[in-house]
Amino acid sequence: MNIRPSILCPIDYSDASAAALRCAAAIAEHFFTRLIVLSVEDPLLTTAMNLETGVVWTPEVSEKDITSFVSKVFGDGSAAQAMCEYEAAVGKPAVEILRVARERSCDLIVMSSHGQTGARKLFFGSTTERVLRETTVPVLITPPTNPEWVHIEEAGQFLGRIVVPVDLSPASAYQTRIAGGLAEALSLPVVLLHIIEPVRNRVFARNPTALESNRRVAAEKGLDALLAIMPPKVRPTTEALIISGEPAEEAARVIRERHAGFVVMGLHGSPLLGPRMGSVTYRMLCLSPALVLAIPPRLTGTTHRRADSSAAACPDHLPA
């Protein structure tokens, strides 16, 4: 049975989540997907409401708020409003976001890097990092400002270029193919970026000059291999860049200096950094105002079919 592709957009009724919702709607409209708008309520807040009003909270209570918010963002009777489906949950935001994404077979999660503060604040911050660590589908993290474009076809005019930070592990090829497809679809130049991290182990740092030279040679070969898998139309406008320093800080600096509005990052594991490099991605999100598409490891085995399906929002499925 074919399942219509779907996008999940968690909101907390802030201006930042309104920006995420506009971005999600533009993607959903382009790919003719479902758009599921999710609100996650704090259990303590719903309990307090029940005690104060004597009315037991139900999902319908939040769905009315979601409907009102969507109407405010898009206007009554808009095409974007018509394609939205509403979902309300109570619990820990990251857990609920991942649960709904799994149960509703979502192909992409779109959420803001910032939320509102106060009693109804959502999950952005530590919850965003947890989603990045545990997601099995791509996550598009949006900056807190509203996008200047409302249709995918207009996005390329404002995004400038795509930065692709790669660690040259086997997963980098999948990440590069996705970035290449997006660059081709949006007519954007690409920066393939590899950051050589400082060596902190004294055993490996006894001859730093030779080590640095060897690492740079290996990085050049790795970037050449990735450049070769870029689409032919994208390859001439792709820059291969190698720099040294702390990954998040240096990536953010390159994004600013190259005026890049879009970043494609991998979320694979590392023996040194743990099962998922969500903390590096989230640190970069805090330092950069760009859109960030975070890509989890490609699924294999019995879930391989699902992995191919979840790529509906990724460039393998984008038109040239």
Image (cartoon, rainbow, N blue to C red):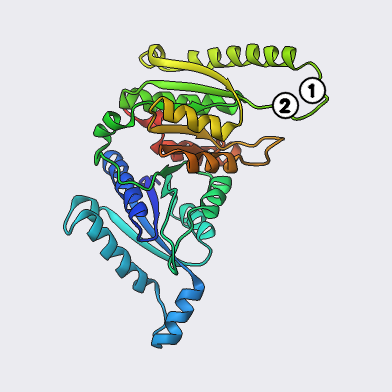
Is residue 116 visible in the rendered structure shown here? yes
Position of residue 254 in the picture relative to residue 31 (left or right): right
- Identify the residue at image location x=30%, y=46%: 146
Could you classify mark 2 by the number of other residues whose Cα lies within 10 Å: few (under 14), some (14-19), or many (20 or more)?
few
Q: Is residue 280 above or below residue 95?
A: above
| Upstream in sequence: badge 1 or badge 2 | 2
Residue 318, given in percent of the width and then of the height, sits at 35, 30
Is residue 178 visible in the rendered structure shown here? no
- Identify the residue at image location x=38%, y=28%: 259
Specify the quadrant that holds the C terminus. Answer: top left
Task: Verify CB contact (< 8 Å) between mark 1 and mark 2.
Answer: yes
- Identify the residue at image location x=30%, y=39%: 31
In-front residue for pair 262/174: 262
The residue at which mark 1 appears reads as: 204
In-front residue for pair 1/244: 244
CA gap between label 1 and label 2 equals 7 Å
Residue 58, given in percent of the width and then of the height, sits at 40, 76
Q: Is residue 47 above or below residue 70?
A: below
Residue 175's disc is none
The residue at which mark 2 appears reads as: 199
Position of residue 190 in the picture relative to residue 131 (left or right): left
